[in-house]
Image: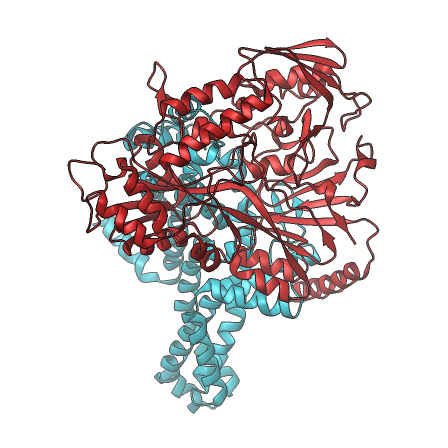
Amino acid sequence: MIAFVLQRVLQAVAVMLTVALVAFSLFRFVGDPVINMVGQDTPEEERIRIREQLALDKPVVVQYFRFVQQIVTGNFGTSLRTGIPIGQLMAERLPATLELAIAGGIFALAIGMPMGVYTGLYPRSGLSRTFLSISLIGVSLPTFLIGILLILLFSVVLGWLPSFGRGDVVHLGFWSTGLLTASGWQSIIMPAITLGMFQLALIMRLVRAEMLEVLRTDYIKFARARGLSNRAIHFGHALRNTLIPVITIVGLQLGALIAFSIITESVFQWPGMGLLFLQAVQFADIPVMAIYLVLIGFLFVLINLVVDLLYYVVDPRLRVDVSAARGG
Amino acid sequence: MSLKWVLQAGVCAVGLAMAAGGASAQEKVLRWSSQGDAFSMDPYVRNESLTLGVMGNVYEGLTRRDTKTLEIQPGLAIRWEQQEPTRWRFWLRQGVKFQDGRPFTADDVVFSFNRVRAGASDLKTRVAGIKEAKKIDDFTVDFITDVPNPIIMYEWDTWGILSATWAKENFALETVDVTKTAPNFASTSANGTGPFVLTYREADVRTEFAVNQDWWDKDGRKKFNVTKVIYRPIKNPATAVAALLSGQIDVVEPVPVQDIDRINKSGQAKVEIGPELRTIFLGMDTDRNELVYSDVKGKNPLKDKRVRQAFYQAIDIDAIKTKIMRNLAVPSAMMIGAGVNGYDTNVKRLPYDPAAAKKLLTDAGYPNGFGITLDCPNDRYVNDEAICQAVVGMLARIGVKVTLNAQSKTIIFPFYAAKRDTSFYMLGWTPGSVDSWNVLYNIVGSVKKDAQGRIVRGLFNYGAWSSPALDDLTDKILTETDKAKRDGMIAQAWKLHTDDIGHLPLHQQALAWGVRNNVSVVVSPFNRYDWSLVNVK
């Protein structure tokens, strides 16, 4: 078990190093940050000085090793755009992104699961068809469009919800939360719906397909033959058996929610890591881009690790195989 | 966290929001938004209009400029005089206090002079060519220059004065170099003499200011009634417009041209239009013997003035103004806009005339035109890429096949700058000094390098158009102290450039600010945010 985890940690390091290398070989194409760092009247010698200090004049490999060296010594560097140390910048932005991702995930689960169960149980009802059409919209409409439409309806026309930002936040130590203020709750509703819309459609369709599958199986027939109530059959037996693949997907999608909240954060001016990354790309803020990509790489490795460990717990066959292999 | 708890919290939240909405506000709050945030609270970190615009409300210069007319007025100095060709004397305003209560004196000016020219300050050009700032008494300072400098104070409206004691006490003696070190006290805090006091700072999210009750010029600004300013950047223009229309923001800058009608018709807000000083123009490689990006080999057609004139007259500037800029542009015959010292209304654009252009091209030996690449930023100026696309179409009519290379400014500008790797390009320029010399030296001056091979003159003259006569005049303009003589030479220099069609000026773009109906603002051609001119009803 420990060996397995260690192996995964080593893999994580390798993945992060590779991500950083790929990132650095791409940074040549994002342009020159110095253009954005100085005013138009700044003389050439000053620009050259900055370029030299940032090692922008050096080959990619040299820049890459400089970066790795910095990380190893625990120095994440400074954002070229804001002048704030990146460690601090990430710590400021992470809570916003995590809260949004979790809110989006909960929204998707809370609405998507019941819809999926219903459409699985009554595939031919009118309501099921409506749910399926809605899920089609969720899958096919681009995120920014959903966001803008929501803003238009609930902020501009109805005036119910704030169109941007996180509202007032409360600082609990290093963590800043918007969930303890009224404006924070109002602010998170639309971004969470926008971010969770695709996941909602995905979960609903997944649950529906699984339910249809399970309801055809023999043990459900036996259960009916035993005279169990519909309620017990549907929720006690059918739904419980559909949950295993659903949990796997939801776990993996949580990573996607965090990593790909860029568009949602930009539409709602949500001060999270996605918005930070987008601003970094436009500014050619190379240190921030590099750290962000490495962090996301790490996050995916971590989630995969947790999922693998869960398999261990859920599926006894895996454990047998590994110990057999070790014994042999 | 149980579901019940969450639901309860939610219900409480809605209740609280309603209570907050019902409370009547005694103070006059101004909620302001722009696309980006001020880089730092240290006014010397970036020479960039947004940072200067925001921090100009906290820090003041020795001079200031009228927000509308740009005329130079007394600021922290009440008057000044060139007592010798290389010595200017400034008399300081007495009784002014910094926001921490300390009095403003000559020591602060001398300290700020040394700070602005040292370390990683990006505002070194404010005091370029000044050897020394000498304190004569508590309210008199002399500036000694290398050569006579008639326009020493032209950019001093954006050189804010810091308190020497405050900076020393808080270890903020130097401007922080972001490439090397973490921010210092002055990056996140501020202590100026201006109308607003920084009260809260969260970079990229929210910055708050409160009115400075002790501001020396409070009585000078009668309509000014704002007591608190909340500055919140919104990156996405659609989100910003929605925030304006839904009443969460009072002023949004800039407004995309396509949204102007919608805002004006909303009944909630209006769009205030004002001219911007920036001139948008096209430049051409008139230096190389063969263009890098063209199908003409062995020669450079753009060296021929007739070809440059053909390009000029083939561009339908009115179509660009009405169709692309939706009238938010002023076509320009010069490389400077109205308001800049040296601007002359008598200089007229050559008429749009494709037939004449075609004939010029034929005379120059290109009856079938030729191919060339136009480099263009797509995220720098208002509708920059659309303008370039229009130029491509217009030049096609006279047979010139233009390939458009439109990319982000962070990618395309280094191309221009590093190796002058362009044959035909778009650029925009605002002379910060509001004087022609800046443009004559940087944009149209011959490219000249120093001993280490670094470009000093003509740093942004990417096509390397050159006129030695103009350079001579530029050098004289720098040191000429007689205003009439100097203006005469500026006119002469511009005539040399216009007659030879050194660049193709297009227009000055307009600024568009979205403003709630209960707010009145003054749109500055510099795009400065002067909150002491704002009135909230």
**Chain shaded cyan:** A
Residue B39 point in image, percent of width and height: 56, 36
Would you say residue B491 is visible in this rendering? yes
Q: Is residue B43 left or right of residue B214?
A: left
Q: Nearer the viewer, residue B356 or B427?
A: B356
Q: How many marks?
A: 0
Q: How is the image coloured?
A: by chain
The answer to whether residue B267 is above or below residue B186 is below
Q: Quadrant of the C terminus of chain B?
A: bottom right
Front residue of A26/A205: it is A26
Quadrant of the rendered image containing residue A48: top left
Furthest toward the left, the residue is B298
Percent across and percent down for residue B265 are 63, 67
Q: Position of residue B75 (x, y in %)?
A: 72, 27
Q: Residue B374, position in %: x, y? A: 31, 46
Q: Quadrant of residue B498?
A: top left
Query: Residue at (39%, 52%) from the top-left corner?
Result: B352
Closest to the observer, A314 or B499: B499
Compared with B225, B159 (above or below) is above
Q: Is residue A101 visible?
A: no
Q: Quadrant of the N terminus of chain B?
A: bottom right
Vertical comparison of B287 with B366: above or below: above
Residue A78 left/right relative to B464? right
Q: Colour of chain B?
A: red
Query: What residue lies at 40% left-to-right and 57% top-to-bottom?
Result: A310
Seen from the viewer's position, the closer of residues B3 and B238 is B238
